[in-house]
Amino acid sequence: MSPLTVPLWPGGEHPAMKVVFPRQQSQKPSPAVLVFQGGAYATHAGSGGGSAEWLAKQGIVGVGVEYRTQGTSDAYPENYADAARAIRIVRDRAAEWNIDPGRIGILGYSAGGHLASLLSTQPDLYAAPDDDLAGRVSARPDLVILGYPLITFVDGYFPGAFANSAANFFGRRDTPESLRRDFSNELHVDRSHPPVFIWTTKDDALVPYTHSELFVDACRKADVPVRYEVFPHGPHGMGLALQQTSEVRNWTSQLVEWLEERWGERFAQH
């Protein structure tokens, strides 16, 4: 099946999501993973490009999701509404697209990792008035994959930190700590949270590895299954890292191994 471009909302072409299907179509429903690229909430098209296509090569339906940012003069709750709407659409159209509605994951890089973990920790945080799927189709993913994610708006925070991601998310620089805590995802993990795969590097100079560790610690305290890979070296924003020569390039094969364990299915690695 050829890739599909599906608008998220009635009456407009954007934001939209691109649904990429495996070349070899399985008779049984396939799992799907939605991808939120990085971009500091200034753009939806930062690091992580090509991930939907890579997932399709593994036999997984890959879904690249546009979400509104400062680049479209938008902030919360529009960014969150787009992410929640995307997963609801995929789950609602699962039968049509031969997707298993119980095996829908999300993959987020950098600020996209913040959006992914916000959705996984608080899937009912906000429902857009024009989301006709809200209330009847769940936005909670079945598993979560995070690459060098922005997690907290509290630890190490100052105005302008993390390439202005927090300011871009809220659409303001003077956000009080009480509000920033509401969107610091390490503070909202509970036992119902889905399993997590998370990776980063020790020398990430833009989003410290401590963000990942805060989330890992929260998952472990809540007895949430989590696999954590921290590599010694690698700059921020590597995405799939397939062209890297250091061991960080192995994260994708480690992810496939983990997905096989979680979903009980062998995936081809290309």
Image (spheres, rainbow, N blue to C red):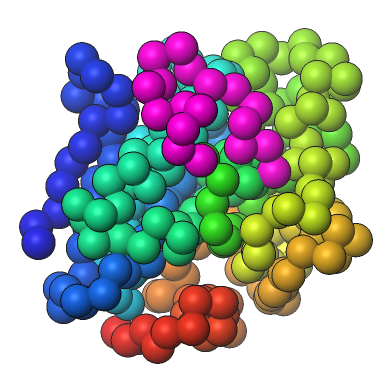
Q: Residue at x 9, y 61 (%)?
A: 1
Is residue 226 shown left or right of residue 25?
right
Q: Position of residue 198 (x, y in %)?
A: 65, 65
Query: Residue 58 colored magenta?
Result: no
Q: Position of residue 82 (x, y in %)?
A: 43, 29
The part of the chain drawn in magenta is: 121-138
Query: Residue 130 colored magenta?
Result: yes
Q: Nearer the viewer, residue 163 or 220?
A: 220
What secondary structure prevails in the magenta region?
Answer: loop
Q: Position of residue 206 (x, y in %)?
A: 68, 48
Q: Residue at x 45, y 63 (%)?
A: 103
Q: Is residue 207 above or below residue 143?
A: above
Is residue 113 shown left or right of residue 128?
right
From where the camera sits, is residue 217 visible? no
- The quarter of the displayed image where residue 203 is located: bottom right
Q: Is residue 204 above or below residue 41?
A: below
Residue reaching furthest to the left = 2
Q: Is residue 99 above or below residue 133?
A: below
From where the camera sits, is residue 7 visible? yes
- Look at the image and tell me in which quarter the C terminus lies: bottom left
Residue reaching furthest to the front = 136
Q: Residue at x 49, y 77 (%)?
A: 263
Q: Position of residue 238 (x, y in %)?
A: 50, 62
Q: Nearer the viewer, residue 167 or 100?
A: 100
Q: Residue at x 59, y 22 (%)?
A: 126
